[in-house]
Image (tube, rainbow, N blue to C red):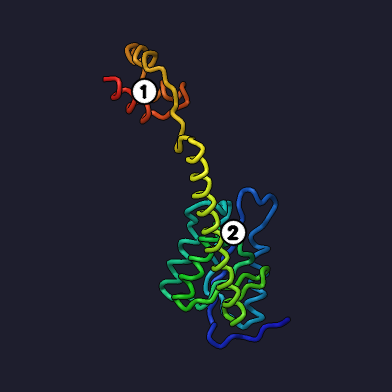
């Protein structure tokens, strides 16, 4: 179904991403489809932002960060991506980011998912996704609480199990001039744990 140009949207920014796990994928395949889509809608492309070889789970993506900074400067009226999983790290991140864009008056379009916040039906879909995300978080929270309560009722000790470290052996190695870092590496524990245990033996 062909879209007609949306009068309120004149400028669009395109975002593409491929990770090192996307073997043989070319980000230009995403961008070409987005360019064609923008042309059909009569939108002017004001910028293209590409994170190449960046994992979707990574906290910091340079081009995504630049895209959001430019969004705050109102450099465009909409953002178009190829698929939602190219944009969001998680459902929570996706919902929060799109909510930020909506507060800035910037529409969001995911081409392959048929997700278009420039339309009333798209905005409704976003509200449903947001509600699902909140529902999922509440379920996880309740499951964790129930699991902890069940474990406590059975007399299980909650929290991390204590790691056994032979501090006499550590002291002997320290006396031979070995560093805490080297000893911790050999024992498979953190240097901070050894510092804490060492203080406890003073």
Could you say which is closer to the camera, residue 78 or residue 36?
A: 78
Task: Tell which tag, 2 or 1, sits nearer the viewer.
Answer: 1
Point out residue 182 in the picture as x, y percentages from the top left corner.
41, 22
Point out residue 162 in the picture as x, y percentages from the top left corner.
44, 28
For the N terminus, which image quadrant? Answer: bottom right
Mark 1 neighbour class, 10 Å CA radius: few under 14, some 14 to 19, many 20 or more:
many
Residue receiving disc 2:
17
Q: What is the residue that sits farthest to the front in this orientation? A: 153
Mark 2 neighbour class, 10 Å CA radius: few under 14, some 14 to 19, many 20 or more:
many
Q: Measured along the vertical axis of the image, is residue 1 above or below residue 194?
A: below
Left/right placement of residue 120 relative to residue 189 reads right
Could you say which is closer to the camera, residue 40 or residue 101?
A: 101
Q: What is the residue that sits farthest to the bottom in this orientation? A: 7
Residue receiving disc 1:
180
Point out residue 15 in the picture as x, y percentages from the top left corner.
56, 65
Q: What is the residue that sits farthest to the right in this orientation? A: 1
Residue at image point 61% right, 56% down: 18
Residue at image point 42% right, 24% down: 184
Point out residue 83 in the picture as x, y percentages from the top left corner.
63, 64
Q: What is the residue that sits farthest to the left in this orientation? A: 202
Residue at image point 45% right, 37% down: 159
For the C terminus, which image quadrant? Answer: top left
């Amino acid at each position: 179904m062909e879209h007609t140009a949306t009068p309120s949207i004149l400028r669009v920014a395109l975002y593409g991403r491929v990770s090192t796990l996307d073997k043989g994928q070319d980000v230009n395949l995403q961008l070409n489809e987005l360019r064609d889509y923008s042309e059909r809608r009569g939108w002017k492309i004001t910028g293209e932002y590409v994170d190449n070889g960046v994992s979707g789970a990574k906290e910091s993506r340079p081009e995504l960060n630049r895209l959001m900074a430019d969004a705050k400067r109102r450099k465009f009226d909409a953002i178009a991506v190829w698929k939602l999983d190219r944009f969001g790290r998680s459902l929570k991140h996706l919902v929060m980011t799109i909510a930020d864009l909506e507060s800035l008056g910037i529409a969001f379009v995911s081409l392959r998912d048929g997700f278009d916040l420039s339309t009333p039906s798209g905005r409704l879909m976003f509200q449903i996704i947001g509600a699902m995300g909140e529902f999922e978080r509440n379920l996880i929270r309740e499951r964790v609480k129930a699991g902890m309560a069940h474990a406590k009722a059975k007399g299980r000790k909650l929290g991390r199990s204590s790691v056994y470290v032979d501090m006499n052996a550590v002291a002997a190695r320290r006396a031979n001039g070995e560093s805490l870092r080297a000893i911790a590496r050999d024992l498979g524990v953190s240097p901070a744990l050894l510092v804490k245990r060492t203080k406890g033996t003073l």
